Image: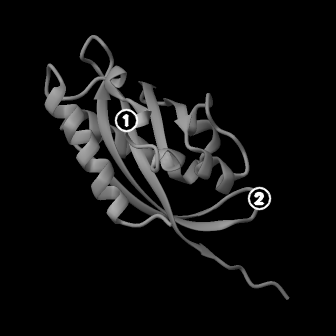
Amino acid sequence: MVSAANFDQFTAYWKLLQADAEGPLPTRSQFNPGKIPTLLPYVYLLEHKSRGEMMVRVMGTALDEISAVPITGLNYFDICPPEDVSLYMEINDHLHALPCASLVVRDITFENGKNYTLSSLGFPMTNEEGVLTYSIGLMLPSRQSRVRTR
């Protein structure tokens, strides 16, 4: 069972990466999945190629299961609801401006009809040249909403 305590565990791991980094942010190459095996099904890694292109590089198995459609390798902006694109662009703008972490809680209905409240905590990471290019995060499905049908 996943819980808010998992956010604390994930944050502690990111802070360890940050402490070992040569600059203010860890690099993507520092990420070692073996250090957080119980969290991996809920981990995502995004590559920010431009304001309108955010490639999904890793999507945990538990997250793929709830979406029912694998999204690794896709541009997130091509698959998220069009009304949400500007919100995620704004979140990315803030992530790149400060840099800072992001905490997002939202209700999502997937194309397969499943409804979830998802809580995600994301942190910035750089490429090998020190450019903020990635965000790594933990996304927890905190509950499944049930839809009544007649």
Residue at 64% over, 42% down: 79
Q: Can residue 93 be seen at all in this image of the molecule?
A: yes
Q: Where is residue 85 in the image (x, y as percent from the top left)?
A: 51, 45
Residue 112 bears which disc, if any? 2
Position of the C terminus, as image quadrant, is bottom right
Q: Where is residue 21 in the image (x, y as percent from the top left)?
A: 18, 24
Would residue 133 be found to the left or right of residue 144 on screen?
left
The image quarter in which residue 90 lies: top left
Q: Where is residue 1 in the image (x, y as percent from the top left)?
A: 50, 67
Residue 106: image tag = none
Q: Which of marks 1 and 2 is nearer the N terminus?
A: 2
Other residues around mark 2 within 10 Å, as few (<14) / some (14–19) / many (≥20):
few
For the question of whether residue 99 can be seen, the reply is no
Where is residue 76, by image quadrant? Answer: top right
> Looking at the picture, does residue 97 appear above or below residue 140?
above
The image shows residue 113, relative to residue 89, as above or below, that is: below
Hey, what amino acid is under mark 2?
A: Asn
Looking at the image, which is closer to me, 145 or 65? 65
Residue ranking furthest to the bottom: 150
Q: Mark 1 points at which residue?
A: 135
In front of the other: 21 or 130: 21
Q: Contact, CB < 8 Å: mark 1 with mark 2?
A: no
Residue located at (46% from left, 43% from top)? 37
